[in-house]
Amino acid sequence: MKRKLLLSALVLVAVSVGGSYYYTTTPTYSVLQIRNAVQDHDVALFEKHVDVDTLFNRLIDDVMAQALFQATNENDAGWSTLSSALGTGIVQMMKPTLVSGLKSSTLRYVETGELVKGGQGVAASAAPAVASDAAKKASLDDMASSFGLEQLQLQDYHVEKQGKVAIVTIPYRNEQLDLPLEMKFTLRDQGGYWQLVHFNNAAEIMSAIEQEQQRRLTEANNKITAAPQNRLL
């Protein structure tokens, strides 16, 4: 009887340990580790679960591609397309500096809990709009502002595992526009832990925010234009 009880206890312990180990290898656990790293100001833990260089290299490419697409489609004139292409080239030359700016401000935020305002002082005022827009987003503070994130501590999220990658969806609300949005990130299986590598829909979110801002501006202008006509009636 005692032997059976002992064996049962050992089995329960083994199952508990095995289940605990398995949980630490899941993408959900890595997401929690990222949150814990920010809360505990643990830069090493953060960099283990976030591939900062890959994340920001892809982010700049995505934002740049979206900006070039919009600039090209808003005006088909040859000079506009040439200017956009020139801007793309400038962004590529600036890219290491932009990545460095985003990385340093992000790691500083993790370490200190303080957002660094402004980028790395990249001179892009005379460059085409594509390059200028990218330079303005060269810090975590500017990036958060672009998305309308008043607070970086987001609690709600959903994880969907898809083989060797996992998609993390984080709903949030742009407080300034009162606009519901959601961010999507990709985590990659690194063998025993997962690492965040891509902000999937950054460009789409920025585009949605810009469209909403333009819609509201057009609506306000229409009201102003209609006001004198209403007074004459």
Image (cartoon, rainbow, N blue to C red):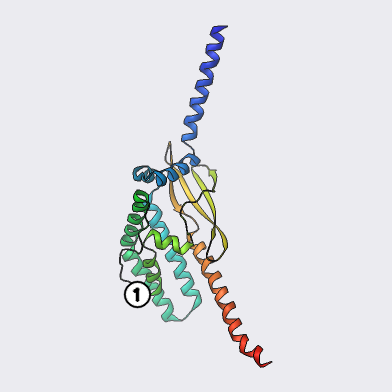
**At x 32% / y 65%, what residue is drawn?**
94
Type of amino acid at the residue the image marks with label 1: Ala
View extreme (front): residue:
231
Among the 4 quarters of the image, the one containing residue 82 = bottom left
Q: Report the residue marked by disc 1.
A: 127
Residue, far top: 1
Q: Nearer the viewer, residue 108 or 77?
A: 108
In the rendered view, would you say 168 is above or below 60?
above
Instruction: Name the quadrant containing residue 160.
Output: top right
Residue drawn at x 44%, y 48% as measured from the top left? 196
Q: Position of residue 101 (x, y in %)?
A: 33, 59
Is 125 situated left or right of 161 in this image? left
Q: In this view, does 7 lie above or below 123?
A: above
Tell which of 190 and 207 is nearer to you. Answer: 207
Q: Position of residue 98 (x, y in %)?
A: 34, 62
- In this orientation, does residue 114 appear? yes
Q: Which residue is drawn at 35% across and 55% down?
A: 103
Point 49% across, 64% down: residue: 206
Residue 141 appears in which quarter of the rendering?
bottom left
Dot 1, crowdedness within 10 Å: few (<14), some or many (≥20)?
Answer: some
Front one among 137 and 84: 137
140, above or below 222, in the image: above
Q: Position of residue 225 (x, y in %)?
A: 59, 86
Q: From this viewpoint, is residue 62 visible?
A: no
